[in-house]
Amino acid sequence: MIYSYTQISQFLACPRRYRYRYLDGWKEKETRSGLLFGRAFESALAALFRREDASAVFFEQWSPYQPVPLDYSRGDSWQVMYEQGLKLLHATCRYGYRSRCLRPVSLSATSTLMALSMAGAA
């Protein structure tokens, strides 16, 4: 068995937490919006490089956190971060990876997707 630095430091800090996490497979619930947003955005960038619809992937990954109470910083909200993510994807397409963008990322198109998914959830 190979142990990572993180596993060893977790064990040294708290053997019980190590057991719960690595042996019993428990996962902590993440509530930091920045981390969850980063994961969703990273998935969208990966989709962009695979020539998939990055805005749809971003929405798919970020939308489950809309009803979840997250820890936001600097007056952010789910909607504000969502719009920032779309703008970042659009800027990535426009300035750096134009050849990889099949279609421009549209705020209105993803707003339509969001409305449809909310209607389906109701």
Image (tube, grey):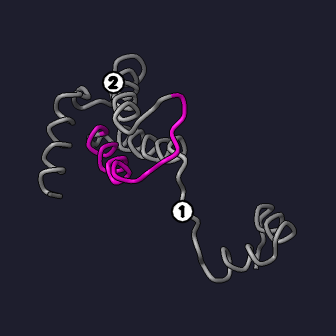
Left or right of 28? Residue 12 is right
Q: Measuring from the top left, give residue 93's x and y in whole percent.
A: 35, 24
Q: Is residue 65 above or below residue 77?
A: below
Quarter of the image with the C terminus is: bottom left
Left or right of 116? Residue 81 is right
Badge 1 marks a residue whose secondary structure is: loop
**What span is in magenta?**
54-74
Q: Is residue 29 magenta?
A: no
Q: Measuring from the top left, give residue 23's x and y in whole percent.
A: 68, 82
- Which residue occupies the foreground of this view, 120 or 52? 120
Q: Residues within 10 Å of mark 1 (few under 14, many from 20)?
A: few
Q: Which mark is residue 29?
A: 1
Q: Is residue 18 above or below residue 13?
A: below
Q: Measuring from the top left, give residue 17's x and y in whole percent.
A: 73, 73
Q: Is residue 63 magenta?
A: yes
C-alpha separation, residue under disc 2 versus residue under disc 1: 30 Å
Q: Which residue is mark 2?
A: 90
Residue positioned 44% across, 51% down in the render: 69
Q: Is residue 54 above or below residue 64?
A: above
Q: Residues within 10 Å of mark 2 (few under 14, many from 20)?
A: many
Amino acid type of disc 2?
Answer: His
Quarter of the image with the N terminus is: bottom right
Residue positioned 36% across, 50% down in the render: 61
Left or right of 19? Residue 5 is right
Quadrant of res 14: bottom right
Of labels 2 and 1, earlier in sequence is 1
Residue positioned 37% across, 47% down in the render: 62
Quadrant of res 106: top left
- Which residue occupies the foreground of this view, 91 or 63? 63
Q: Is residue 69 above or below residue 20?
A: above
Amino acid type of disc 1?
Answer: Lys
Q: Measuring from the top left, give residue 8's x and y in whole percent.
A: 83, 68
